[in-house]
Amino acid sequence: MDVNEAKKIFLQALPELSEPLKSAVKFTLSNWHKLSCDPSKIDDLPQEVWRDVIGYEGIYQVSNMGRVKSLHWLGGRLIKLSSNKKGYLSVGLSKNNVTKNNKVHILVARAFLPNHENKPIVHHKDGNRKNNHLENLEWATHLENQQYSIQMGTKKFPLGIEFNNAKLTEDDVRYIRAHFIPYDNEFGNSAIAKKFNVSSFAIYDVIHGRSYKNVI
């Protein structure tokens, strides 16, 4: 329905309305230009697709571009996003007089990304927590998310024997680097981590030279 059609409906219904409703309709019509030019009203971006926010169907929608709108307004109205302490964009959504803060990347993933393996984490592929475009998001396990963070350099772990709590000796490190075979049942990351009673992250750091840099 365009603006002119909506005005026509209002005018046709006017004689049958009560006086308070008539006043409200007259005010709307007289201020229509202001209302229709509200800067927060939405013009879709190229290739932008909107879907209902899971749990808030018919109230809010999220787009594949990471924008969120309220359906309380004619044509929808964009909601301003805020950034939390960890750098994630979030938005407050209200239902049944209860307002909850929601991370936008999770809203996008739930609306657009199938999660057949029931993975608990939504990962930003480029490491930018504010880039909530659909193509930048994927579901991940906690382990996968930690590994991605290491690869992107957004998370660091202790660097081997320079720290007092290091568990591996220099001989252990040489053994690991000499015998490591990716995804192998005996010499893969998980198997070696279990053998030396350390985390798989510690093995990852050893193999990729992020820890025990002094061991040759």
Image (cartoon, helix red, strand yellow):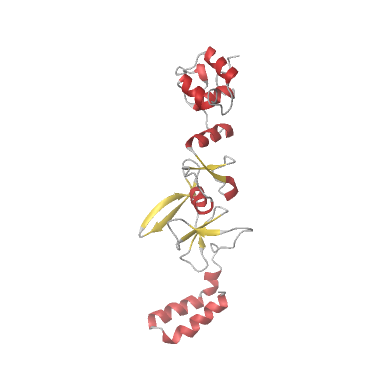
Among all residues in the image, which is located at the extreme front?
A: 185
Residue 157 shows in the view: no
Task: Tell me the quadrant of the picture where the C terminus can be found.
Answer: top right
Is 209 or 127 nearer to us in this picture? 209
Q: Position of residue 129 (x, y in %)?
A: 54, 43
Residue 180 shows in the view: yes
Q: Position of residue 170 (x, y in %)?
A: 53, 13
Among all residues in the image, which is located at the extreme right?
A: 46
Is 212 or 115 nearer to us in this picture? 115
Among all residues in the image, which is located at the extreme top?
A: 171
Task: Tell me the quadrant of the picture where the N terminus can be found.
Answer: bottom right
Look at the picture and state if 46 lies above or below 192: below
Among all residues in the image, which is located at the extreme left?
A: 97
Residue beneath the point at 55% across and 25% down: 188
Residue beneath the point at 57% across and 50% down: 134
Q: Position of residue 115 (x, y in %)?
A: 50, 47
Q: Position of residue 187 (x, y in %)?
A: 55, 22
Residue beneath the point at 40% across and 57% down: 94
Look at the picture and state if 154 lies above or below 114: above
Q: How many marks?
A: 0
